[in-house]
Image (spheres, rainbow, N blue to C red):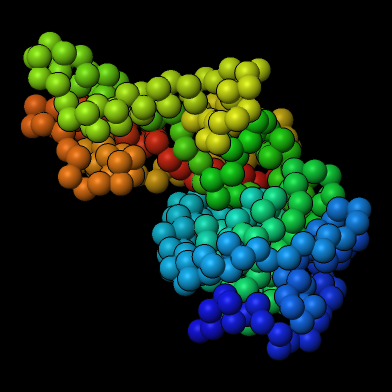
Amino acid sequence: MASLKDLLRPGRPAKPAPDWARPLFAAELAPHLRRKDGEVLVWTIEDRASKAAITDQFKANAEEYHRRYAASDHFERLFRQGLEATGVAVAEAPLILDLGSGSGVNSIVPCRRLFPGARMVATDLSAELLAMLAAYALDNAAADAVVCVKMDAMSERVTPGGFDLVTGASILHHLESPERGLNAAARALKPGGHAIFFEPFNGWAIMRLAFERILAEAELRGDPLDPAADAVLRSTIRDVAERSDPDTTTSWFRNLDDKWLFSRSRVSASAKAAGFETVRFVPHRGHPTLYKDMTAVQMRLSTGRADVVLPDWANAIIDSFDAALTHDAKRELMMEGTILLTKAA
């Protein structure tokens, strides 16, 4: 397999955007990022074409290309899980619009595996991440089936009713208005079409409660936690509190990357208002040691270290939460889940 650097060298003739993609937009597709030979990697539907180039920093980081796409298996499992649990059948060889694609690892690559013959429009505000996806498509003989477009996918530049499936892997919780994303998905779909989103939910409040109890117990015992562990617990508590019911009027909220932890009721109401007839949820986890495992993940991801652990008495508190909530309760109070929406026929 060629590296991304190789793919950015001259060697392929320039091609226009595929004919199937042009009617899906309310404005003309214009070149945004090209290879040295002139072939377009990323399109835009802004009013004038950009002569932007791939940056040296992007090329220097091109070795991440292979490792990044090896991570798609996890998201393919989530797609399969959602479709199998709900019994939803996507149209054969579907037209797919992906919102906030990035490099396509979470959505475009899994959909290409799951839906043979699919033609996909990948959208993002980052042209360089889309260039990485375009390079992947070239490398895998999928350039005619994947069109990368730098744009705000929540805008009205997408032709209404053009797509069979809309996907968004961890995109809604980044938006100031998740309703805008749901409206965009409903507007883009054909009648009877489906949308699939992967999002975090407010079941994280259980982790907040467990961590608050551990901090209180540490103070009562006079047994301070490892400073790194203490910082993880406090930051998680603050994060869950702030994202569960955020004040959307503040500059802090606007500057926050991960903005929301959703409730099922909010998503259901917003989806119905957008024009979706059916709203389904599929929790991602509910196993017996869920909170113990997620605590370990938080410690590792937040510190970048494997040696930051809680004392035995603190782990016993986490275990008590795992023991108190049944499998079904953990799934009802889900921390992460798939949202599968169907537009009225």
When the figure is inspected, residue 167 is found, relative to residue 1, above or below; the finding is above
In the foreground, 314 or 120? 314
Q: Residue at x 67, y 31 (%)?
A: 177
Query: In the figure, residue 43 lies in which quadrant?
Result: bottom right
Furthest residue in direction top, as rendered: 220
In the foreground, 46 or 284? 46
When the figure is inspected, residue 283 is found, relative to residue 321, above or below; the finding is below
Residue 79, can we see it? yes
Could you say where residue 98 lies in the image, as x and y percent from the top left? 66, 55
> Left or right: 326 with respect to 159?
left
When the figure is inspected, residue 270 is found, relative to residue 279, above or below; the finding is above
Q: Residue at x 36, y 37 (%)?
A: 331
> Left or right: 212 with respect to 44?
left
Q: Residue at x 85, y 56 (%)?
A: 45
Could you say where residue 157 lies in the image, as x and y percent from the top left? 85, 49
Query: In the figure, residue 330 lies in which quadrant?
Result: top left
Q: Residue at x 69, y 76 (%)?
A: 143
In the foreground, 114 or 236? 236
Could you say where residue 232 lies in the image, as x and y percent from the top left? 30, 31
Query: In the figure, residue 294 lies in which quadrant?
Result: top left
In the foreground, 336 or 228? 228
